[in-house]
Amino acid sequence: MTGGPGRRPGQGWSEALRFNRTAILLVSAILVAVPAMAGTPSPSYPLLDPEPSVAAPKRSATLHPDRQMELLARKIGQMILVGFPGTRPAEPWPTRIAAMIADGRIGGVILFGHNIRGPKQVSGLTEAMIAAGGRLPPFVAVDQEGGYIQRFRRREGFKGLPSSARTIAKQGLCEAWVAYANMARELATFGVNVNLGPVVDLNINPLSPAIGRLRRSYGIEPGAVTDYARQFIGAHAASGVLTAAKHFPGHGSAALDPHKRVVDITRTWQPQELEVFRALARDDGVAMVMVGHLIHPGFSDGDRPTSLSRRAMTGELRERLGFDGLIVTDDLGMEAITDRYGLEDAAVMAVRAGADILIFANQRAGDNDLVERVIARVSGAVAAGRVPASQLDRSYERILAVKRRLAARGPLPPLPDDGGLTPDICSEAPGRSITSNCRLISPGAAHVRQAACGTVEEEAPARLAVP
């Protein structure tokens, strides 16, 4: 495994073509079948209802080889969540991103502060991305935790959420639900359908540069962290916004920041850090779990970070904890990864380990052929037998299932007359803790009031939310 920031331009691409003759032919076919700036998905085999079904892999042998290559490229593309420069649809990068969404070469985007200038602007940007997806909506994701970590801020004209997780945890569960319900509604209003939170790391090391110092943790006690995480998840579900619990298997003890270097938690990690992930997996309410760039002998394959390790993703999270949602990597462009691996190698390792979604923040001026290189490298690994095709099929099925639910989501219920939810909605059940059913989408303000205050326990859901 070679690569990292010091690679020569084009070096990663040339390495991708060294596997063997089969891999070279495979990559070539993909590049022919998926043109760089095509505008619409194949009309014969729309992505939402792929033909043949990934559930019947034997039928794929009857397809023309070019069609097989196109389907493989699209399966890999749906696993890619990428950042980009730009703020308006007509700019070069947003135009390129919309074309990639339409072609199925990426599954979605992640927005950062440099993409967001104001309500009208961001609405135009996300509308263009969603329209490009047609019947298969792209994931439009942000990090909107509140406090220090948020992209929709008051200074750009949004409500935002000034309170950090630490501050939220000092309030009641009802107040937490209300704060997150208002935040989620704002995200949904402006086209965001994935919030990369809640942070469920325990605050074991208050001086941790990535968690404790930024006040991103609800606390050190697993039960309390679980309770507040459930309010975050349930409040977002009420607006049809997916959530991603992070950072598995627990980042709260780390003394280093993975944005800058590899983080080894061998001596500081504690077993109770798994308790929140176990509880949320059992709830079956959180759509995604994000795996961090952490090294621990109980979770790492050798010295690989957990985000690239099968022991962490498949062995622990999928099999032992029973999580059946989408497994997401933290940004593969962080220095914890790029200092040791090339992005293409990291992508292959993450897919082999069991990741369903690969995140590339892609913030430094934009890497023009990043997506093509990743698709080529993973395709080559499939051709060489290093990544089982059946594993891609399973990830593809999970992604399509979630996106079908996003596509079926109805209009949001109306807000109360004051334009938002307030803590007063819980006055009828003072002192009661909330038990949010994260599969409920509330059809109106009255039901929101009941769900928030924990007064609805056995009532059948009006309709199911995305998982």
Image: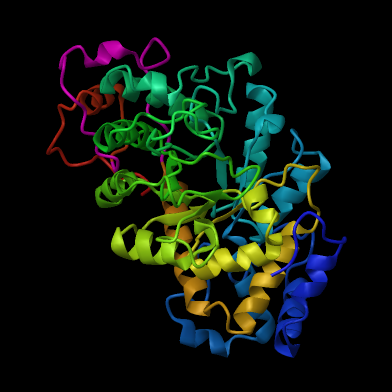
Residue at the image point whose x is 44% and y is 56% from the top: 326
Q: Residue furthest left?
A: 458
Kindly tell me whether residue 9 is visible in this rendering: yes
Q: Is residue 156 above or below residue 405?
A: above
Q: Is 124 placed left or right of 161 in the picture?
A: right
Is residue 214 a member of the stretch shown in magenta?
Answer: no
Q: Is 346 placed left or right of 279 in the picture?
A: right
Q: In x, y percent, where is residue 89? A: 75, 38
Q: Is residue 98 above or below residue 355?
A: above
Residue at the image point whose x is 87% and y is 60% from the top: 9
- Of residues 356 and 269, which is closer to you in this image? 269
- Of residues 138 and 196, which is closer to you in this image? 196
Q: Is 396 placed left or right of 219 in the picture?
A: right
Predominant secondary structure, magenta span: loop
- Of residues 448 and 111, which is closer to you in this image? 111
Q: In x, y percent, where is residue 126? A: 63, 37
- The picture quadrant where one finds residue 167 is top left
Kindly tell me whether residue 46 is visible in this rendering: no
Image quarter (top left, top right, bottom left or bottom right) of the N terminus: bottom right
- The picture quadrant where one finds residue 115 is top right
The residue range painted magenta reads: 410-439
Residue at the image point whose x is 73% and y is 53% from the top: 99
Q: In x, y percent, where is residue 298? A: 40, 61
Q: Is residue 206 above or below residue 390?
A: above
Q: Is 261 placed left or right of 460 in the picture?
A: right
Q: Residue furthest right?
A: 9
Figure label count: 0
- Of residues 140 and 217, which is closer to you in this image? 217
Is residue 429 a member of the stretch shown in magenta?
Answer: yes
Q: How is the image coloured?
A: rainbow
- The picture quadrant where one finds residue 426 is top left
